[in-house]
Image (cartoon, helix red, strand yellow):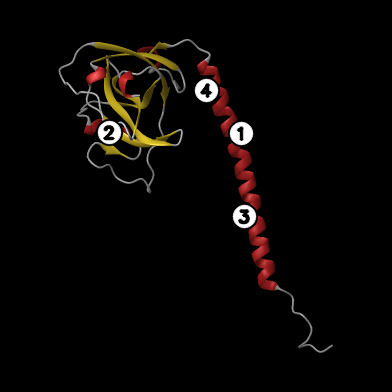
Amino acid sequence: MTDAARPRFPLVLTVVAVLALALLLTLGVWQAQRLQWKLDLIARSEAAARQAPVPLEALLPLEDPEFRQAIVTCRGLNTAPFVELQTIDDGDAGVRLISACPIEGRGTVLIDRGFVPAEVADRPAVRADAAMPVVIAGVVRRPSPPNALTPPPSGKLFYGRDQTAMAEALGVTGPVSPYTVYATTSANPELT
């Protein structure tokens, strides 16, 4: 057999295979680490769900109130100004209504009032002078900030949970909590 007929060692293919193997091993290790993080998150969430709801004012000073159940009293929440957060809920497109709720001595907390499907055109009436106290139950969460791929807001329609920008759009001038209360009882049940 001559040198021309002898097959050459596939150097390029070998390098590509080694790089692909290294990439897959790295992704496997990353997923294993992520699994531990997710299991911890689930355990914290389940432990918090077993605890009785507490007034939000008592939770905010805690080091980590995330996932705790809270009771919040907001004046005029059912007719409060809101921004809309574009989202998908159980495969249905729609928006989440986000309003500001001043908390005595703690600044302002954003309240996620709930999901409104895209086919529902009605929105709650807005009355800035409403003062009726509305009591809701909810879960305290620290939302993930929008990333570089998140489109910028369009007026009062948001595509990511930017706490500061949402608060500014709602006219909040003081400090804003890094936490959001996700309502588990609706301030406007007629829309959900």
Measured in 3D between alpha carbons, the distance from the residue under mark 3 to the one under mark 4, in whole angstroms, is 32 Å
Label 3 or label 2, whichever lies nearer to me, is 2
The label on residue 23 is 3
At a point 53% along the width and 14% down the height, the residue shown is 50
Where disc 4 sits, the SS reads helix
Q: Is the residue marked by circle 3 packed among few (<14), some (14-19), or many (20+) residues within 10 Å?
A: few
Q: Quadrant of the N terminus?
A: bottom right
Q: CA distance from mark 4 to mark 2?
A: 26 Å
> Decide: marks 4, 1 in contact (CB < 8 A)?
no
Q: Which residue is mark 2?
A: 166
Q: Earlier in the sequence, mark 4 or mark 2?
A: 4
Label drawn at residue 118: none
Q: CB of mark 4 within 8 Å of CB of mark 2?
A: no
- What is the spatial separation of the Cα atoms under label 3 and label 1, in whole angstroms? 20 Å
Q: Which mark, residue 36?
A: 1
66 relative to 167 in the view: left or right: right
Report the residue marked by disc 4: 45
Q: Residues under labels 3 and 2: Cα distance?
A: 39 Å
- Give the amino acid type for the residue marked by disc 2 in the picture: Met
Q: Where residue 40 sits in the image (x, y, percent)?
A: 58, 28
Q: Amino acid at mark 3?
A: Leu
